[in-house]
Image: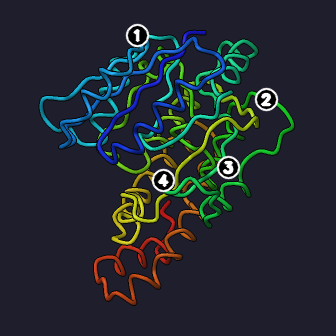
Amino acid sequence: MSLEFMVPFYGDPGLLKETVASVQAQTDGDWRLTVVDDGYPDDSIPGWFATLGDERIRYLRNETNLGANKNYEKCLSLATADDVTVLGADDLLRPNYVSVLREARRRFPDAAVIQPGVEVVDEHGRPAHSLADRVKRVYAPRTDGPVELSGEDVAASLLKGNWLYFPALCFSVAKVREVGFREGLNVVQDLALVMDLLQRGESLVVDPTVCFAYRRHSSSDSSWRALEGTRFVEEREYFLTVAGELQARGWSRAARAARLHVSSRLHALTYLPAAVRQRHRVGMRNLSRHVFGGVGH
C-alpha cells in the first residue's frame, strides 16, 4: 500500500503545524505528505516547511485563492499514491494511523473507501462530545473488527445518518477519480462521493481501531452554514435528487431514507432556537422549511 496525505490549508498555522507533526510521528514511516496552501496570509509558513528537512513532505502554494472545495479537488488531482487521505488542516493522526490503514488495505485490497476509528476533540485538543457525534454513533455499524460493507444496506444506513468522518477516510485514488465530485456541492460532497461509489458497486471498509482525532470547532464554517440554514438547503436538494436515483436503481429502502432524511431534519431543528433568538430571518425560513417541509416524492 502506498499512502499519501493531502492537506488543503487555509486557517490557523499553529494547528497546521500540529497536523504535520502528527503525520511525522507515525510508527510506520512509509507515507508522503503534500500541503496545498490556498494563499493564507502568513509569510512564515513556507519558511517553516523548509526547515523540516523531510523529503516526504512537500509544500505548495496556490497563486490565487481557489476556495475550500476547489482546493480539495486540486489536492486529489495532485495525489500520486495508490491511496489518499485528505486531512483537515487542524485534524490529528494518532501514531498508528498508517499501520492501521495498511493492514486494512491488505485485508480488503479492492475497497474504495476505508473508515478507521475516530475520536473527537475540541479546538484545544480536549475530548469533545457534541450532539452530532452522539448521533453518528447511533447510526454507525457496531463491529469488533474490520468489516467490508456494500450495496443498499450501507447506503440506507448512511442516508439515515451520515456516520462518516470525511477527513479520516482513506480513498482508492483510482476509484475516486473514476467517479469524481458532483458539481455545486459544498456541504454534502463527502456523502455524495461515497454514495456514488456505492452505487457503482464499490465497497466501504469500517475498522473500529481508533487512530484519528477529528477536531470539532464551535465556530467552524459548517456551524455558520448550519445557523444560516444554507447547508440544509443543499442537503435537502441532494437527498431528494439521490432518492430518485436510488429508486430508479431499485434500492427502495435507501430511497426512502433519502426522502425522509430524518437525522438531517433533527440536526436542523437543533439550530432553529438560536436562529429565533437572533431573529435570523433567513435562517429561520431555511431551517423551518427543512425541518417541517414535505419529503418529496
Q: Mark 2 and mark 1 in contact? Answer it, CB < 8 Å.
A: no
In the current view of this chain or complex, which residue is farthest to the right? 144
Task: List the residue tagged with mark 4.
Answer: 239
State the separation of the CA atoms marked 3 and 4: 13 Å
Q: Mark 3 and mark 2 in contact? Answer it, CB < 8 Å.
A: no
Q: Amino acid at mark 3?
A: Arg
Q: Mark 3 and mark 4 in contact? Answer it, CB < 8 Å.
A: no
Horizontal side, residue 203 vs residue 46: left or right: right
Height in image: 34 above or below 192? above
Task: List the residue tagged with mark 1.
Answer: 55
State the separation of the CA atoms marked 1 and 3: 49 Å
Tag nearer the camera, 4 or 1: 1
Tag nearer the camera, 3 or 2: 2
Task: List the residue tagged with mark 2.
Answer: 146
Task: List the residue tagged with mark 3.
Answer: 253
Q: For the N terminus, which image quadrant?
A: top right
Dot 4 alpha-carbon crowd within 10 angstroms: few under 14, some 14 to 19, many 20 or more? many
Q: Mark 4 and mark 1 in contact? Answer it, CB < 8 Å.
A: no
Tag nearer the camera, 2 or 1: 1
Q: Amino acid at mark 2?
A: Pro
Q: Which mark is residue 245?
A: none
Q: How is the image coloured?
A: rainbow
Height in image: 204 above or below 239? above
